[in-house]
Image: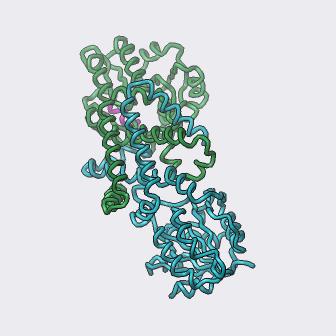
Chain colours: A green, B cyan
Amino acid sequence: MTIQRITIVGTGLIGASAGLALRAARFPGEIVGWDRNPSHLQIALDRGAIDASALDPISAAVSSDLVLLSGPVFAIQDWMGRLAPLLKPHQLVTDVGSVKVAIAECAQPLFGGPGQAGFLPGHPMAGKEVSGAEHADAELFAHAVWLFTEFAGHPLAVEWRSWVERFGCRIMDIQAARHDEICAWVSHLPQFLSTALSAMLEDRFADAPDLRAIGGRALREMTRLGASPYTMWRDVAHTNTETIAEALLALEQRLAHLRENLKTPELRDEFERANRFRTNT
Amino acid sequence: MTIQRITIVGTGLIGASAGLALRAARFPGEIVGWDRNPSHLQIALDRGAIDASALDPISAAVSSDLVLLSGPVFAIQDWMGRLAPLLKPHQLVTDVGSVKVAIAECAQPLFGGPGQAGFLPGHPMAGKEVSGAEHADAELFAHAVWLFTEFAGHPLAVEWRSWVERFGCRIMDIQAARHDEICAWVSHLPQFLSTALSAMLEDRFADAPDLRAIGGRALREMTRLGASPYTMWRDVAHTNTETIAEALLALEQRLAHLRENLKTPELRDEFERANRFRTNT
């Protein structure tokens, strides 16, 4: 049993990059794509990320072996609900959503049961602060971690994982709750932190055109994710709210602690802890 | 009048990079170096950042046209006090310290008066999270801003500024108080933020070896400065305390605001402000 036809629903940055990565890895089958934004779909087609654009994503999915759902979490959940009743057990749906408990809960009644298609929840830890197929890159996933939060096997799951490995990814299996916890601290927190920092500087220094030049690389890196699109992160904020709020509160307290110790030896201890974190990289 | 002999006091990352940049820009004179750490001095010599290592930095400085003071703010102030009584009006001292009001206050009674040497307070907005001459780079200052906070002219100041331009820098003149304010927000805040974030993650996830791999580029960028040395930043914390504390408090409040609005339309407004900050880059 092999994957011969893939439909990518959502040919934005990640979906189109997956198509390009499949091609670079010499996937021999057909890749059909769809996006609710016709121009994004056209760019994905023009760039060779997909072989054909689907007029009707549902009929494309129904005639595919594997369906890759790419986009914000709520859009992925929406497609899960629409496709599940139409797919068969030999078919596999996989996703790239940033939050996994909400996806797993959505999948539970819809997939993996008798007569139902399979579902493999996935999350490539790669991305850019810019969106859209024009920024897609076959190398986007190289050296990145691709997380999977469902261990139970579907016949096609092993094959999809082997394609992911051929993208240059390191595959890691993790429980959905642990995924959402870790991602809250190492992915969602950096995003919301960068957004808050960028927004604050915009409010305070919008009239200081030289600010960014003065800030240099440090400022550029710390605010890079400030360019990230709201539509993508709104769904993360809505579906992993409590864990993200916990991480934000912890950082607020940590900043207050450092602020109160700018002139005490505790500052040295804090630098030493931070140095250790980086040394262990 | 030209600069024929330069003494670099402190041949660490910045001092040795300045030496390499002078050489790359075909500075025809002699560059003498000194560092309190003999092995750092040897590395600077081995790498060609300096022509000779001074056994006695004071006699080297006394026989130089220009003295470049490089290191933490308190070390720079210390050298200013030791050298000022020995130097003559035809000589110029310049520095690369991260805080400028404290340097300017220190310079005021020591330099620029009758019979005193000149002082040109400078600050290249370039650096790395690692220190030492082994990481020095002739290209470190390329495309960076080099700030000067003293407009009054010394005959050699114009010439030093022209060398800095040949390093590939954009020179900007700014008042010392405005320098310390802007740097608190775009340089010191990113540093202390990255330190706090790294230290917090070290405390919470020291036992999760895969954490950094999962975090990927976003985490790597946001914690890069966590590797920065305490000795350098202690002096910044001590000499720009109030402005840094103000910036930290503002960020704490901004994070709390975002945390309280993870599920409200205010989150969209915050992303739009952040997007604007990045668009105006």
Looking at the image, is B24 positioned above or below residue A63?
A: below
Q: Position of residue A273 (x, y in %)?
A: 31, 57
Viewer-nearest residue: B63 or B210: B63
Q: Is residue B48 visible?
A: no
Q: Quadrant of the C terminus of chain B?
A: top right
Q: Quadrant of the N terminus of chain B?
A: bottom right
Where residue B216 appears, as percent x and y from the top left, is 41, 45
Quarter of image, res B138: bottom right
Total labels: the figure holds 0
**Residue A163 sits inside the magenta stretch:** yes
Residue at image coords 47%, 73%: B75
Residue at horizontal 31%, vertical 49%? Answer: B200
The answer to which quarter of the image holds residue B148 is: bottom right
Magenta: main secondary structure equals helix
| Residue positioned 57% across, 70% down in the render | B95
Asked if residue A232 is positioned above or below residue A280 in the image, the reply reads above
Say whether residue A216 is visible. Answer: yes
Q: Would you say B182 lies left or right of A123 here?
A: right
Question: Is B93 in the magenta?
Answer: no
- Tell which of B124 and B44 is nearer to you: B124
Q: Quadrant of residue A236?
A: top left
Q: Is residue B88 above or below residue A61?
A: below
Q: What's the magenta region?
A: A157-164
Question: In this rendering, is residue A218 above or below A155?
Answer: below
Task: Give the percent coordinates (x, y) of residue A6.
Answer: 45, 24
Q: Residue at x 32, y 18 (%)?
A: A117
